[in-house]
């Protein structure tokens, strides 16, 4: 049997099934002890109706079973490790209210909810609420409804692109994720200015971090005046294909989905060379060169690369030199001709580089790389 992501593998599939069964059983017993299903809604996006077509919104949420007083922890206002001690509520009926309409659906494994609902809303920010009958108070979030006439969208990585995390180092990852609080995290200098300059009102932050981490990122972006936007995170548990979900595949999937949802837009793709953003963006630009306005890569220093990967070069550079070490689909970076790209050590450097790059006029002009 196959799914959208590939063949179902017996081991991970069994693990995912066992995880779902344990979640349902734990949720049942906790509910008997007074814990209640609590919906958490994440900021997302939608499309305004155009040319007689129907508009829609993408609603992303998660339902957790928790004590009535514990919403503060789940929403990210407590120390890191507490956000990961939770019990999800899969296959639970929920009501979604947006644009004056009520929609009914059920949560997926892990208590997640990621649905597209037809609704005609004007461009701008709108509130969405998710409620569970008999559960805690409704969860509330915001949806940015986009008019495709803006012409340009921005997709940005988070870790080591806008926020200094150096996540691949196991000890540093543990500290940043489970101990450090939001106000202690440092932004990459100048990156908020760069993204503000590139934004035309539609920014999507894509991270390989778990959804438990989303409230931290949301508060960090607000504190440091990054442009508001949707958060697209992932889950660390087993799926039917893998023991652990692939962060690389997550980014590729989200890029393709955004392209399909907004075929009129071109995209500024922002990332760093500490993991595999250059390879992911180069592959996307090779397949869809007319849809990429700019690729902007923050380059880590050799000491930062040592901290994240143990070697003083980026993973993509290492795989270029030693292709036998490369995972499938990550054999090197080959940017297509005709797609502008810039690189620099921080957001300030990227701003300077883009001043001489003609991507703001039209992405189909002859390329002028500024690496």
Image (cartoon, helix red, strand yellow):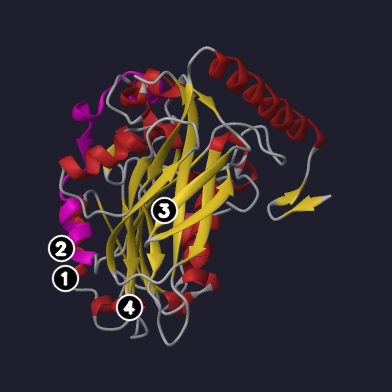
Question: In the image, is residue 187 part of the stretch drawn in magenta?
Answer: yes
183 magenta-colored: yes
The residue sitting at the top extreme is 33
Q: Which residue corresponds to the image point at 37% horizontal and 36% vertical from the top-left?
A: 305
Decide if residue 80 is on the left or right side of residue 116.
left
Where does label 3 land, which residue? Answer: 97
Q: Earlier in the sequence, mark 4 or mark 1?
A: 4
Circle nearer the N terminus (2, 3): 3
Nearer the camera: disc 3 or disc 4: 3
Cα separation between marks 2 and 1: 5 Å
Quarter in which the C terminus is drawn:
bottom left
Which numbered disc covers residue 352? 2
Q: Which residue is mark 4?
A: 151
Q: Which numbered tag is attached to residue 355?
A: 1
For marks 2 and 3, give the CA distance: 44 Å
Name the one closer to the observer, 87 or 267.
87
Residue drawn at x 16%, y 45% as measured from the top left: 189
Label 4 crowd (10 A; few <14 / some 14-19 / many >=20): some
The residues colored magenta run 172-198
Residue contact at pointers 3 and 4, CB within 8 angstroms = no
On screen, 215 above or below 362? above
């Amino acid at each position: 049997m196959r799914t959208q992501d590939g063949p179902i593998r017996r081991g991970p599939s069994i693990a995912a099934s066992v995880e779902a069964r344990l979640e349902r059983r734990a949720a049942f017993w906790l509910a008997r002890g007074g814990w209640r299903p609590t919906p958490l809604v994440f900021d997302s996006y939608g499309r305004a109706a155009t040319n007689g077509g129907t508009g829609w919104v993408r609603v992303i949420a998660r339902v957790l079973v928790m004590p009535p007083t514990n919403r503060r922890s789940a929403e990210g206002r407590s120390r890191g490790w507490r956000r990961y001690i939770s019990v999800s509520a899969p296959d639970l009926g929920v009501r979604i209210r947006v644009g004056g309409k009520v929609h009914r659906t059920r949560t997926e494994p892990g208590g997640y909810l990621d649905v597209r609902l037809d609704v005609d809303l004007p461009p701008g920010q709108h509130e969405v609420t998710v409620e569970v009958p008999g559960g805690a108070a409704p969860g509330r979030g915001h949806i940015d409804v986009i008019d495709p006439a803006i012409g340009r969208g921005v997709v940005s990585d988070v870790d080591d692109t806008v926020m200094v995390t150096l996540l691949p180092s196991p000890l540093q990852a543990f500290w940043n994720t489970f101990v450090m609080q939001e106000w202690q995290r440092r932004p990459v200098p100048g990156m908020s200015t760069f993204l503000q300059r590139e934004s035309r009102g539609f920014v999507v932050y894509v991270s390989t971090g778990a959804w438990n981490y989303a409230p931290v990122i949301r508060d960090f972006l607000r504190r440091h005046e990054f442009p508001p936007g949707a958060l697209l995170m992932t889950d660390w548990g087993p799926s039917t294909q893998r023991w652990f979900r692939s962060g690389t595949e997550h980014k590729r999937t989200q890029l393709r989905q955004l392209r399909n949802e907004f075929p009129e837009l071109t995209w500024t793709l922002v990332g760093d060379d500490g993991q595999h953003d250059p390879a992911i963006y180069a592959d996307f630009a090779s397949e869809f060169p007319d849809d990429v306005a700019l690729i902007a890569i923050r380059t880590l220093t050799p000491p930062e690369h040592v901290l994240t990967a143990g070697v003083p070069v980026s993973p993509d550079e290492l795989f270029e030199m030693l292709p036998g070490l490369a995972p499938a689909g990550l054999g090197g970076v080959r940017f297509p001709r005709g797609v502008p790209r810039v690189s620099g050590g921080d957001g300030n450097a990227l701003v300077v580089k883009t001043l001489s790059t003609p991507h703001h006029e039209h992405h189909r002009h002859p390329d002028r790389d500024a690496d």
